[in-house]
Amino acid sequence: MTTAEKSNRIIVTVIGQDRVGIIAGVSSVLAEAQANILDISQTTLQEFFAMIMMVDLSKATVPFDELKKRLNRLGETMGLRIDAQHEDVFKFMHRI
Amino acid sequence: MPMRFSPQEILETIRMVQMENLDIRTITLGLSLRDCAHPELKQAAARAYDKICRRAQRLVAVAEEIEREYGIPIINKRISVTPIALVAESSDGEDYALMAQQMDRAAAEVGVNFIGGFSALVQKGETRGDRALIASIPEALSTTERVCASVNVGSTKAGINMDAVAALGRIIVDTARRTASRDGLGCAKLVVFCNAVDDNPFMAGAFHGVGEPECVVNVGVSGPGVVAQAVKEAGDADFGQLASVIKRTAFKVTRMGELVGRAASDKLGVPFGIVDLSLAPTPAQGDSVARILEAMGLEKVGAHGSTAALALLNDAVKKGGAMASSYVGGLSGAFIPVSEDAGMIEAAASGALSFDKLEAMTCVCSVGLDMIAVPGDTPPETISAIIADEAAIGMVNRKTTAVRIIPAPGKKVGDFVEFGGLLGRAPVMALNPLSSAEFIRRGGRIPAPLQALNN
């Protein structure tokens, strides 16, 4: 696993109180950026709702930094914590 | 395409970062200044300034980029340089504070909060440059913000240079006096080592050793909060299971260091040096090494059993971390600085943790008597004797030990010193009042210890 064979996949996590429109909101931000959702799952983290998306940025029209900012902003307006991280973080921590 | 990670794995990472203070404590750029030597001190200092600015220009921007990309906070960006005694020695000058001032300017220019390497290595004896550097420490630390100084006074192979130990007692008291308005803050930036390492990324003791390449990226990980949580979740597990839990956690924490180190090396075009596997606390709640020991079942750190608990923790962190990184180095162990750890501060203030117990705990962990405030009227010989004791522990046990002690001007036992930020606050601890002056006055060198017949 070297940074040379770098993938374009990121993990988007949404944590907070469950409410209507979370998936719709996040998906539309991603769609606008031509970011492709590969997988979605939902679970709970302690008492909070948690949604996890794996997203492919290889055809994205917006740089990662900007997409992350848009997601952060959406999170603020919805009262949720929305974050985006490169998948390598999880690969390094959980896969040998 | 199926998710390649389970939601539990992803949330574990998120929880570590957002709730348990997992972070990369430091990305430290090691930089050789050997080619900055010049017959005129002023020129040498100017060359050092230029080189630091040039080579470290992108450090902070790159670290921030990595931080955003991976969502892992990188708390400090720092620089370590060749021990300045080696760089300044071929010049005519005697007042090396000039070098420190230019290092300080360069650090401010590139946006790092500390720069280490105002250092001398004198375990076996001193050259003219070493003497000049040590004499310049009080001036250097009282006229700069970001410069950190260190002196290596002993090693397992060389023994302990007691002349340097005696001098440093006076230097520490003088540094405290010159920074009296800030509770002796200068001393928080001065580390006296035995068996100092060349690739330590942590301040205040970082310097870029003589066997190091031109430029290198070293990473220090942290995560006492993550380990404390794992220990709590382990419930009443026995010690074998407890060690396994800590190893697994240390592995995951260290992987983050490895990832960040490789990414930084890649982006900066500088070779990747090492990951330092230390558990480095901060004064923030939930970021304390003391709390890990308490989670193991001690009423408070300092209770009997603290040394054993720390030994287990330190060893398990190394075992787990060593598997996670291709290059491990630096200090690699649990730090127990008093002022920088909420649990240590509490234990010291309540009297649960004595100076002597701290000394015992340093026998089994990294690094030593760290960030300890003592009364302002402590004689220099007593400070020297404390350094000698700690260096003896390092020398005999073939490990790094260090002393970072603050004789807080005007303060008495029970008072508090306040440094703020990562340096925290500390209660002034009581020392043994008996004199060590005659012992320190002897001078000379304590011979290197026998390396066989190990009982």
Image (tube, coloured by chain):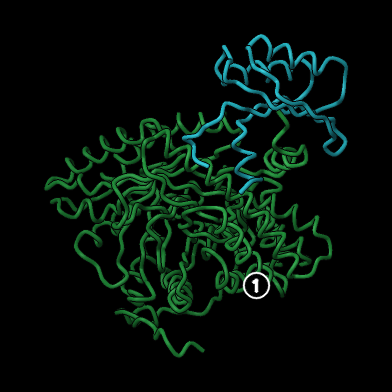
Look at the image and give the colour of chain B. green
Q: Which chain wears cyan?
A: A
Q: Residue at x 38, y 32 (%)?
A: B110
Q: Visible in this render: residue B424?
A: yes
Q: Residue at x 24, y 58 (%)?
A: B132
Q: Position of residue A39 (x, y in %)?
A: 74, 26
Q: Is residue B147 above or below residue A8?
A: below
Q: Position of residue B88 (x, y in %)?
A: 21, 51
* Of residues B38 and B188, the one drawn nearer to the viewer in this rendering: B38
Residue B10 lies in quadrant: top right
Residue A3 located left or right of residue A73: left
Residue B397 located left or right of residue B226: left
Q: Residue at x 57, y 13 (%)?
A: A62
Q: Is residue A28 above or below residue B431?
A: above
Amino acid type at image mark 1:
Thr
Q: Residue under label 1, please give it.
A: B307
Q: Visible in this render: residue B420?
A: no
